[in-house]
Image (cartoon, rainbow, N blue to C red):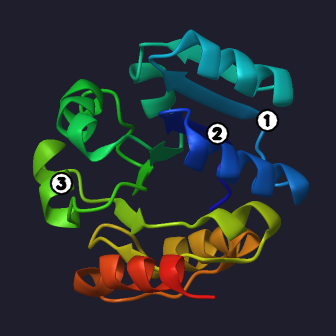
Amino acid sequence: MSYKSMGFIGGGRITRIFLEALNRKRMLPSTVVISDASEKVLQMLKARFPKIQTVQGDNSKPAAQDLVFLALHPPAVGGGLAEIKATLKPGAVLVSLAPRFTIKALSEGLGGFDRIVRMIPNAPSIVGEGYNPVAFGPGVSKKEKDDLSKLFKKLGDCPEVDEDKLEAYAIITSMGP
């Protein structure tokens, strides 16, 4: 599946890393929508990536895209899920970049939506040298896993791991050489 549109809920550091890496590889789709509470953050992103769409404080617009990245700090995730669950397309895939929230917890917060991926990316992804472990939810098909893995590999190494080891991998890679 080719993702014709991407949405980012949260416009912070990790969103910028993703945008830089995908832009460098010319992998950004024609439609990229980013929401954030901060007008300043959105202005900085728009200055760097003029073709993106930005919306302040409205997570429903990025949530209505084909591939949706949840890039919120853990304390904001619960509220973010409640806000977007009615907007997610049935065929969309949600990629959570937030630590600590399991696929099961995310699915429950989204009313049973199970097309969920968890990934904990690290900073070297900005230049395609990241180590970004990934866990896939039960609603993501083998073909979609393959397609997403190809996309994620633009950020660096993205091994599929057991979800219960995701945070351990992230800690080790952030502390390593």
Q: Which residue, given by chain and number where applicable, does mark 1 sit on?
A: 30
Q: Specify the amino acid type for callout 3.
A: Ser
Q: Specify the amino acid type for callout 1.
A: Ser
Q: Residue at x 44, y 17 (%)?
A: 37
Q: Position of residue 160 (x, y in %)?
A: 46, 87
Quadrant where the N terminus is found in the figure: bottom right
Q: Is residue 46 above or below residue 169?
A: above
- Label of residue 10 in the image: none
Q: Specify the amino acid type for callout 2.
A: Ser
Q: Nearer the viewer, residue 144 or 122?
A: 122
Q: CA distance from mark 2 to mark 3?
A: 22 Å
Q: Position of residue 47 (x, y in %)?
A: 83, 21
Q: Position of residue 96 (x, y in %)?
A: 38, 55
Q: Is residue 31 above or below residue 96?
A: above
Which numbered disc, 2 or 1, marks the residue that appears first in the sequence?
A: 2
Mark 2 near mark 1, Cβ–Cβ under 8 Å? yes
Q: Secondary structure at mark 1?
A: loop
Q: Position of residue 72 (x, y in %)?
A: 38, 40
Q: Which residue, given by chain and number where applicable, does mark 3 sit on?
A: 107
Mark 3, other Cα within 10 Å: few <14 / some 14–19 / many ≥20: some
Q: CA distance from mark 3 to mark 1?
A: 28 Å
Q: Quadrant of residue 146?
A: bottom right
Q: Secondary structure at mark 3?
A: helix
Q: CA distance from mark 2 to mark 1?
A: 7 Å
Is any part of residue 111 visible from this angle?
no
- Label of residue 5 in the image: 2
Q: Residue at x 48, y 44 (%)?
A: 68
Q: Residue at x 71, y 32 (%)?
A: 31
Q: Is residue 107 above or below residue 129?
A: above
